[in-house]
Amino acid sequence: MTLEKTTRPLTFLRRGQPVTVGNVPPDRTLLQVLREDLHCTGTKEGCGEGDCGACTVVIGEAVDGKLTYQAVNSCIKLAHSVDGMAVFTVEDLSSDSGEQHPSQEALVQCHGSQCGFCTPGFVMSLFGMYQRYIAPTLPTACGSLPPEGALAPRGGPSALGSGGKGITREQAQVDLSGNLCRCTGYRPILDAAQQMGSLPLPPGCGVDEAVTLAALKSIRPKDQAGDAYLRPATLRALLQARSSHPKAQIVAGCTDVGLWVTKMHKRFSQVLDVTAARELRRVETYPHHFAIGAAVNLTDAFAALVSEYPPLKTFAQRFAGLPVRNAGTLGGNVANGSPIGDAMPLLIALGANVVLMRWDRKRQQIAHRELRLEDLYTGYRTNVMKADELLCWIKVPRAVRPSPQSSPASGRGGKTGRPASEVSSIPLPLAGEDWGEGRTKEGQAFLRVYKISKRFDDDISAVCLAIHMSVAGGVVTQVSIGAGGVAATPVRACQTEAALLGQPWTADTVMAATATLRAEFKPISDMRASAHYRQTVLGNLLQRYWLESQGMQHINLESLNAATLEAMV
């Protein structure tokens, strides 16, 4: 007897009140629910693939007793993934008397809207910034104290009437990278981002976090075995669900699967969402490596990577746009295995491993196996995972092995668990400073990752190359190179590594290795680049790595300014 899969009602908060929608198919997007079921047409549909940001909404979720805010693309986010959360749309920001939220008023005052189609998305991204950087610094937030441990924004504290802006222009550019405007131009929009912190917050426009957190507890969802949309809350339950439903479509942030729905019109009778499994929502630090759970979003995963490897900061900010990084997961990016996925070349170069897990029915326990990331793939978007297996962890070697005093054990195998949301970043070295990542037993380590794309922000790579090398006594003692966009899968440049290992780190060695790298892969020509271009760029990037290792810093985007450009003339 086959039991028919049912879809439980979808419930989330809007303006602090529960909203319930019934009969929502598992593959229906949040944008469809908002516009077609709830008639909230302020949220727009532009590209339908998470590129333009017109559909941006903000998701509020209770994490460790606090309310977190994430701007996401509703056009590719499955509706059931927000079950039990708070959803903020552009209709929810103004007060009942019609007074505008500072994110809206700042756009008006700075003339940041022209045709207006993209404006709701920009408003919501600005609102997300306001809640993260400005609201915690206000003396009171709707009658409640700022969240304990709230961090002051980079631009300094902001309070009612203080005149503080709270957000730097650089931070605004990063956080608005997932929103496109085709007519107004970005200057007035960036002005609005900086100005909204100095505007008063009218009564009724703020978020009462205490009330919201209490309301979220009252609508906490519970999985049922026959649900069409499964979102287990523990790793054990997740693996058991995978074992029982091997044909269910696996999703995490839906930043790729969402396009299967919107562009390829695929339908899924059952979906298994990994993002609620609490064990997989963590970044855990061990003496020699750190482990990123498969449900950690890209924003927090890259924060963990940057904290260990500071030169990755710019690369991390160029990975898609912020709404995609807030929704997508590093585990999903790796499991998807796209040959132009940016994370895999980097992880290959860092020597990362993946941990695959499944539910062993015979032993009634979790079974796992571990393998090198580059060994996961067998062909174009195919891999070695069995029908009942899930990619659960990505293990990345630490940059510098810590001393016992600097790495206290937590009583669980010597690991130090840290919530993904609390990972901090380390600033990039200044031009002229040492650009390595510490000294290993093989010598001085150097890491660089290069992304070549038509746009700087929010674009897909034509070529991605990551190089991690150690040099001691002028000789290459260790090297690992990951490449993307040049084969059917993300690949390791084994022949080029062999051409470099044990050789003197000189211009002649680099020239010979450049020829090897260009010949090692046979890329295809497509809409992003020709095969010849890709081969040529591969070699050029290795030469750029050599120049940077010799102290040439002005070729880096991070160090380009008026002074360096003038010096180059």
Image: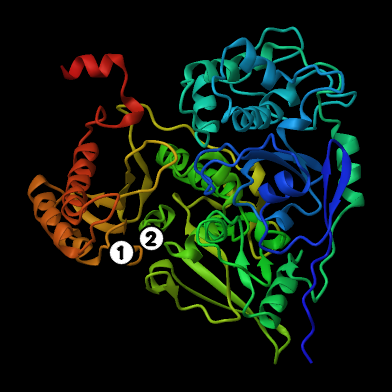
Which residue lies at the image location 67% right of the left edge and 39% below the top edge? 57
In the drawing, does residue 140 fall left or right of residue 42? right
Q: Amino acid at mark 2?
A: Ile
Q: Which residue is mark 1?
A: 492
Residue 544: quadrant of the picture: top left
Instruction: Measuring from the top left, give residue 84's x and y in whole percent.
Output: 81, 52
Is the Cβ of the residue at disc 2 closer than 8 Å to that at disc 1?
yes
In the drawing, does residue 287 fall left or right of residue 415? left
Q: Residues within 10 Å of mark 2 (few under 14, many from 20)?
A: many
Q: Amino acid at mark 1?
A: Arg
Q: Secondary structure at mark 1?
A: strand
Q: Which residue is mark 2?
A: 348
Instruction: Measuring from the top left, give residue 219's x and y in whole percent.
Output: 88, 52
**Residue 152's mark?**
none
Which residue lies at the image location 21% right of the left edge and 53% below the top edge? 530
Residue 97: quadrant of the picture: top right
Residue 228 against residue 452 in the figure, above or below: below
Instruction: Measuring from the top left, give residue 205's x and y in whole percent.
Output: 81, 23
- The answer to whether one can see residue 302 in this image is yes
Residue 565 against residue 303 in the figure, above or below: above
